[in-house]
Image (cartoon, grey):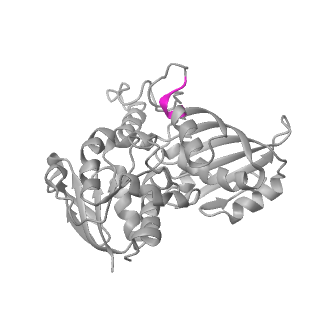
Amino acid sequence: MGYKVVVAGATGNVGREMLNILDERQFPIDEIAVLASRRSQGTEVSFGDKTLKIRDIEQFDWTGWDMALFAIGSDATKIHAPKAAAAGCVVIDNSSLYRYDPQIPLIVPEVNPEAIHDYKNKNIIANPNCSTAQMVVALKPLHDRARIKRVVVSTYQSVSGAGKEGMDELWDQTKGMYVPGQEKEPNKFQKQIAFNVIPQIDVFMEDGSTKEEWKMVAETKKIVDPSIKVTATCVRVPVFVGHSEAINIEFEDFLDEDEARDILREAPGIMVVDKREPGGYTTPVECVGDFATFISRIRQDSTIENGLNLWCVSDNLRKGAALNAVQIAELLGNKVLKKG
């Protein structure tokens, strides 16, 4: 026996990826509905070897549905998630709307699966920010061994994190560099993204950090440990898919790089590719379409007493969004609802 599952926002990058991953992982589904705004009603999307027609989210009756994966942004989620939850449909939300609500669990299944039971508070579960999700998968097994005091992270985030508009802008600007008359001014991003990097993701806050940087701090504390100090610099780079992070970690106890490498090799959701030779590491292009979070360049930081550096790469549309949401659905089904 399977579940009655809804994917809301099924016409977007993340929504389509949710459908792909549900199919790839053979999630037990008896019935599936795909939703979007009224203007997309009747549009067809693929689900395995099936073609599904988009239904209008405004008119959808949530009664009798088991769970819904939301990829519709905070404004629409604020309207529709409470309706779904009130009807008994558990919402797994990819927006930032509920991440910081103390009553709503923020879950990365490899890190804090025990939090799944808190879904009962509001019938809603939050999916973390893409840059946070891959980082905490790497941090948790190391934290369990040597207790992390402080994390300094610099991100190199792909344009797909800004949706289809971000991907289109990189493509159009790149073409415009070579084709006279097709130059494209920045629209989605604050400055030119083609052949450039932009040290701003989301809006600036009063302390000079951006909201993306603040999210990494707040979410790491909620998911892993509130005592961990985090400082982040988030940068948009001209890569279509795949986020990269250079992470510096300070521990309470000494952790040898070889032991850290062994710990990460055994940790769920992680693939270690760490050879000290040209090309002995993973780049964003190589992680696209993969479920794993890749860790490379593990080494001691000699400037502090108990420090390590590492390189972390993951497909942001998968582990950073759609895959993590599906893993939460699997956790919910296996640990709580138990129908599959």
122 sits left or right of 155 in the view: left
Task: Classify the position of the N terminus by image quarter.
Answer: bottom left
Asked whether the viewer can see residue 241, the reply is yes
Q: How many marks?
A: 0
Asked whether the viewer can see residue 10, the reply is no
Q: Is 20 rendered above or below residue 256? A: below
The question of residue 211 being in magenta is answered with yes
Q: Is 294 rendered above or below residue 331? A: above
Point out residue 33 in the picture as x, y percentages from the top left corner. 23, 63
Point out residue 8 in the picture as x, y percentages from the top left corner. 28, 54
> Which residue is located at x 40 percent, y 53 percent?
121
> Which residue is located at x 32 percent, y 26 percent?
181
195 sits left or right of 252 in the view: left
The question of residue 110 being in magenta is answered with no
Determine the image quadrant of residue 60. Answer: bottom left
Task: Give the main secondary structure of the magenta stretch.
Answer: helix
> Which residue is located at x 13 percent, y 53 percent?
59
Point out residue 332 in the picture as x, y percentages from the top left corner. 43, 65
Could you say which is closer to the camera, residue 319 or residue 243? 319
Residue at the bottom extreme, as displayed: 1
Q: Is 217 rendered above or below residue 272? A: above
> Which contiguous range is marked in magenta?
209-213
Task: Classify the position of the C terminus by image quarter.
Answer: bottom left
Point out residue 189 in the picture as x, y percentages from the top left corner. 41, 29
Residue at the front extreme, as displayed: 121
Could you say which is closer to the camera, residue 299 or residue 255? 255
